[in-house]
Amino acid sequence: MSLPAWEHFHHEADIGVRGLGNTLPEAFEQAALAMIAVVTAPERIQYRRSVEINLSAPDNEFLLTEWLNSLIYEMAVRRLLFSRFEVNIQDHSLRAEVWGEPIDQAKHQPAVELKGATLTELKVEQTEGGYWIAQCVVDV
């Protein structure tokens, strides 16, 4: 397997997003990219504006849902889509800079509206092979 990578996984009503990376921050970045790919093709999004995100949580699992929900919030409030993520994680605190551009219906052709990251199938762990998995189901 070539890392970093992202993928979707089957879930009955919503959609699972999974980020894979050599590091925990890389897995979080890829989970965000997987979530964006539910809405539109990430390669359609240019890096025109940046937003800073700072948050903390009691553990890495809740940190993942807080991270994804923060992105959903920023997208809704600022009317932006993101496609580049630079994440730093230390002691269950996350600092990130994310880049994207305003939503353009014709260019991005958004498929769905993201409602939130859930605790369903929530997992953040380092595998025996040494790479990290960060996953959950997002409500659409």
Image: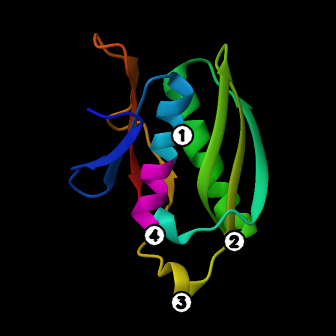
Please state the extent of the stretch shown in magenta in the rendering: 33-41
Q: Is residue 39 above or below residue 59?
A: below
Residue 130 visible in image: yes
Determine the secondary structure under disc 1.
helix
The secondary structure making up most of the magenta span is: helix
The residue identified by callout 2 is 79
Mark 4–mark 3 distance (CA, rounded to whole Å): 11 Å
Pointer 1: what residue? 29
Question: On the rendered image, what quadrant is the C terminus found in?
Answer: bottom left
Measuring from the top left, give residue 100's x and y in whole percent. Answer: 67, 62
**In this view of the protein, can residue 140 be seen by the observer?**
no
Farthest residue toward the bottom? 106
Counting residues from the N terminus, which is met first, the one under dot 1 or under dot 2?
1
Q: Is residue 46 left or right of residue 5?
A: right
Nearest to the observer: residue 115 or residue 132: 132
- How packed mark 3 is, by other alpha carbons closer than 10 Å (few <14, some 14-19, many 20 or more), is few
Helix, strand, or loop for circle 3?
helix
Instruction: Provide the residue designation for mark 4.
Output: 40
Label 1 and label 2: CA atoms lie apart by 20 Å
SS class, disc 2: loop
Q: Which label sits in the foreground, 2 or 4? A: 4
Q: Which is more N-terminal, label 4 or label 1? A: 1
Picture quarter with the N terminus: top left
Q: Alpha-carbon distance for marks 3 and 1?
A: 26 Å
Q: Which three-letter amino acid code belongs to the residue tagged 1?
A: Glu
Residue 3: x and y in percent read: 38, 33
Q: Indicate the amino acid at tag 2.
A: Arg
* First reached walking from the N terminus: tag 4 or tag 3: 4
For disc 3, the marked residue is 106
Residue 63 at x, y = what percent?
Answer: 58, 29
